[in-house]
Amino acid sequence: MRRGYNPYLLPPWLRRCRFYGKMIIIPISCFQLIRLLIIPTTGDFLLFCCLCGCCFLFHKNII
């Protein structure tokens, strides 16, 4: 098992997807929060929870 996480060992296409994912996850989650506050449904809540989880994982460099 390797020590630590090195994103440069990933293929270039996956690094690019990770980079763009980091850039767009915050605006999408903000939009989802506004939508959740206006019209709360179970689907919106679950999607918002998944987006918040992804934001946390991207912030901690786990993904």
Image (tube, rainbow, N blue to C red):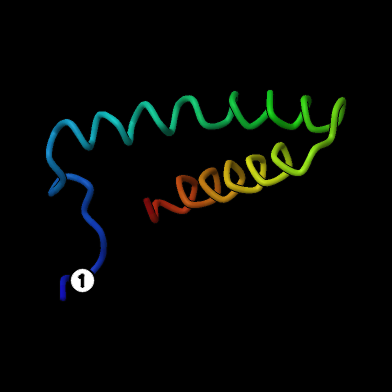
* In the image, farthest residue toward the bottom: 1
Question: Horizontally, is 4 left or right of 44 in the view?
Answer: left
Q: Residue 37's quadrant in the figure?
A: top right
Q: Which quadrant of the rendered structure holds the N terminus?
A: bottom left
Q: Which residue does the image show at 67% across and 40% down from the upper left?
A: 48
SS of the residue under disc 1:
loop
Question: Horizontally, is 12 left or right of 40 in the view?
Answer: left
* In the image, farthest residue toward the right: 38
Q: Which residue does the image show at 84% across and 35% down from the upper left?
A: 40
Across and down, in percent, residue 5 comes to 25, 59
Nearer to us in this view, 60 or 44: 44
Nearer to us in this view, 43 or 2: 43
Q: Which residue does the image show at 17% across and 31% down from the upper left?
A: 13
- Crowding near the residue tagged with mark 1, few <14, some 14–19, many ≥20 C-alpha atoms within 10 Å: few
- According to the picture, the residue beneath numbered tag 1 turns out to be 3
Across and down, in percent, residue 61 comes to 40, 51
Question: Horizontally, is 12 left or right of 30 in the view?
Answer: left
Nearer to us in this view, 31 or 41: 41
Across and down, in percent, residue 58 comes to 45, 45
Residue type, numbered disc 1: Arg
Q: Is residue 32 above or below residue 57?
A: above
How many numbered marks have been drawn onto this rendered protein structure?
1
Q: Is residue 15 above or below residue 2?
A: above
Q: Which residue does the image show at 29% across and 31% down from the upper left?
A: 17
Question: Horizontally, is 16 left or right of 31 in the view?
Answer: left
Across and down, in percent, residue 11 comes to 12, 40
